[in-house]
Image: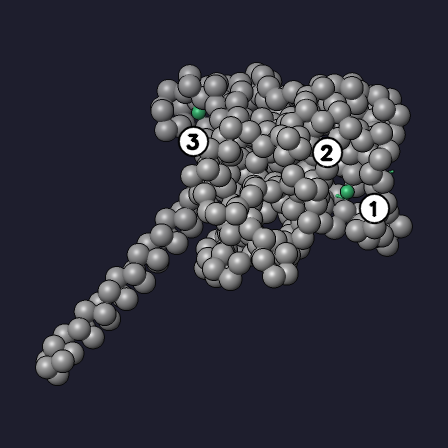
Amino acid sequence: MFIDRLGWNPFFRDSFDQSARTGAYPGRISRAYYNSYRIAGENGEENAVLTGNLRAECEASGDYPVIGDWAVLTREPSTHAALVHGVLTRRTKLSRKSPGKGFNEQVICANMDIAVVVGAFDLEWNPRRIERYLTLAWNSGAEPLVVLNKRDVREDWEALLAETECAAAGVRVLAVSAETGDGIGDLERIIAPGRTAVFFGSSGVGKSTLLNRLSGGEYSATHEVHGKTSQGRHTTSTRELYILPGGGIVIDTPGLREIELWADERALEGSFADIVETARECRFSDCSHTEEPGCAVREALENGTVARGHYENYIKQRREIRYLERLADENLMRKDREKWKKIGRFQRELKKRDKGGL
Ligand SMILES: Nc1nc2c(ncn2[C@@H]2O[C@H](COP(=O)(O)OP(=O)(O)OP(=O)(O)O)[C@@H](O)[C@H]2O)c(=O)[nH]1
Ligand SMILES: [Mg+2]
Ligand SMILES: [Zn+2]
């Protein structure tokens, strides 16, 4: 079946069977605009919209279907338009905090097997930024991978690769060039048939060019949906899902400018695995690794086992995540207060009615 090529598997089939509604069929969201979706399925690609009920639910929760989601669809008998009734439980999701003050999760894409952090060896090379992306990758539930592109522009790329490997704390780092094709074979093998990878990272690192190279030039990076930047560069403006000739699936995303963390502290056990491991030797189990005596992390910092930039970023990210957790608690408490206010109002209303003899 064609949908097997889109990443359909027994997990989604079971969940689809449970949500059974007559005449329903599954499809995978391959593009999402505001209220309209492009769906890939057994019959190729088609447009779909959300049902009124689902739209109301999404508005209330802020959680709209995203690219990579598996949708439960029906066809409108008169117009043959496809309707999305809901999405199947996500196995993984890549999220960040919505830019701005509010406390909102923004889901970038769903159901990926591999979260590929893409960086480059040019001016964009920045191990601290890779560490941030990696925290999101670990939090997504997918397998993280780092790809450093534009190997052709730096003669000393091997030194930068080694430094990135330290920052990536055990995650595999591939050094490639989308331009020359060097190192692309490894990436191709990792994105095996039926597996879904998302490419995310800063703008201009070459995500779309990589996709283009993997697809043998079949999808041009100058695709019609890509607008031109002032420098004349084609920058991706919407997220899109592609099937590679080799059978792997890639979600290309526009470069992220702001990377606000949306993660719980467990994600740091992945993105800073080396530090978390070392911290087991600290004298105090709740050591903050800043001032306490007997801190194994600071010792590792002093003897050079852990790089200073890596350590500082760990402390910074942990602080951010704890702040996020406090915001989550406050959000919960606020919701709870609102709920009890409503209940109180309702009870007073009832009492009034009782007195009125209704
Ligand atoms: N020298 C060199 N240039 C590359 C390589 N890969 C991409 N580029 C160039 O880098 C620029 C940006 O590439 P894109 O593929 O558009 O980057 P992107 O990550 O998709 O950017 P956004 O869509 O804005 O997020 C283009 O001018 C590419 O030609 C490479 O391996 N080597
Ligand atoms: Mg792009
Ligand atoms: Zn410590």
Crowding at mark 1 (Cα within 10 Å: few <14, some 14-19, many 20+) = few
Residue type (three-letter) at the residue carrying disc 3: Ser
Local crowd size for mark 3, using a 10 Å CA cut-off: few (<14), some (14–19), many (≥20): some
Where residue 18 appears, x then y in whole percent?
42, 39
Question: What is the residue that sits farthest to the front in this orientation?
Answer: 78
Indicate the quadrant of ligand 1 in the picture: top right
**Type of amino acid under label 2:** Ile
Cα separation, mark 3 vs mark 1, equals: 49 Å
Single out the mark in the foreground, 3 or 1.
1
Name which of mark 3 and mark 1 comes first in the sequence: 1
Which residue corresponds to the image point at 55% horizontal and 51% vertical from the top-left? 74
Quadrant for residue 356, please give it.
bottom left
Which of the two discs, 2 and 1, sits closer to the camera?
2
Looking at the rendered structure, the secondary structure element under dot 2 is: strand
Q: Residue at x 35, y 57 (%)?
A: 335
Q: Which residue is mark 2?
A: 243
